[in-house]
Amino acid sequence: MPARRVAVAALMAALIAASAWVSVPAGDVPVTLQTLVIVLAACVLRPGEALSAVGVYVLAGAVGLPVFAGGKAGLVVLAGPTGGFLIGFIVGAAVGAWVREQTERSTSGSAADALAALSVLAIVYLCGWAHIAFVLGAGPVAAFAGAVLPFLVPDAIKAAGAVWLAAALRRSGAVARAEK
């Protein structure tokens, strides 16, 4: 992998950590800028790079670095209400990048990015909802009402911002489409 792509993936991991510090309490799951950066990772990184960038971020928090929302850290965060969303970030970024790679062959870059964003959000919500509903025992309806519904509009806005930012970064030459 070219050094530039490694540097972009490492920068993305750092941006995810920084975006967690912008945290607005909203019940058990805060509103952060992480969704924007996770979607951006799916739009500008290859699937393995996206998986690595987000995986490094989650691993750093799990081993005790204060990179999770509100400066939290440790395995207790992964076991708590935000744990499913954090796991969803890893899977969602990788799957979103894969969706983007598959669809950019036959659609415009922005359309591929938008499909990647939808994929990321769907996976993050599914993982977060399932964790709260079934692992923590909140029940499916209560988990959806408290941990998904309030985030739909803010996350759609952040995802749209990430799609716009990915296109702007490509136009500027800061990132390029991955070579096949």
Image (cartoon, helix red, strand yellow):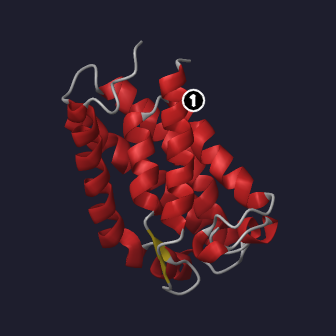
Instruction: Report helix, strand or loop for mark 1.
Output: helix
Residue drawn where x is 36% and y is 32% of the image: 100
Q: Position of residue 166 (x, y in %)?
A: 29, 42
Q: State the count of labels.
A: 1
Which quadrant is home to the C terminus?
top left
Q: Position of residue 179 (x, y in %)?
A: 40, 15
In the depicted structure, whether residue 45 falls above or below residue 89: above
Residue drawn where x is 40% and y is 49% of the image: 39
Residue receiving disc 1: 48
In the depicted structure, whether residue 27 falls above or below residue 49: below
In the depicted structure, whether residue 139 falls above or below residue 176: below
Q: Amino acid at mark 1?
A: Gly
Residue drawn where x is 69% and y is 73% of the image: 72
Report the side of 2 relative to 165 (left or right).
right
Label 1, residues with CA under 10 Å away: few <14, some 14-19, many ≥20:
some
- Is there any visible trace of residue 8 in the rendered image? yes
- Is there any visible trace of residue 126 in the rendered image? no
Q: Position of residue 47 (x, y in %)?
A: 51, 31
Report the side of 125 relative to 160 (left or right).
right
Q: Quadrant of residue 173?
A: top left
Residue drawn where x is 65% and y is 66% of the image: 131
Report the side of 154 relative to 23 (left or right).
left
Which quadrant is home to the N terminus?
top right
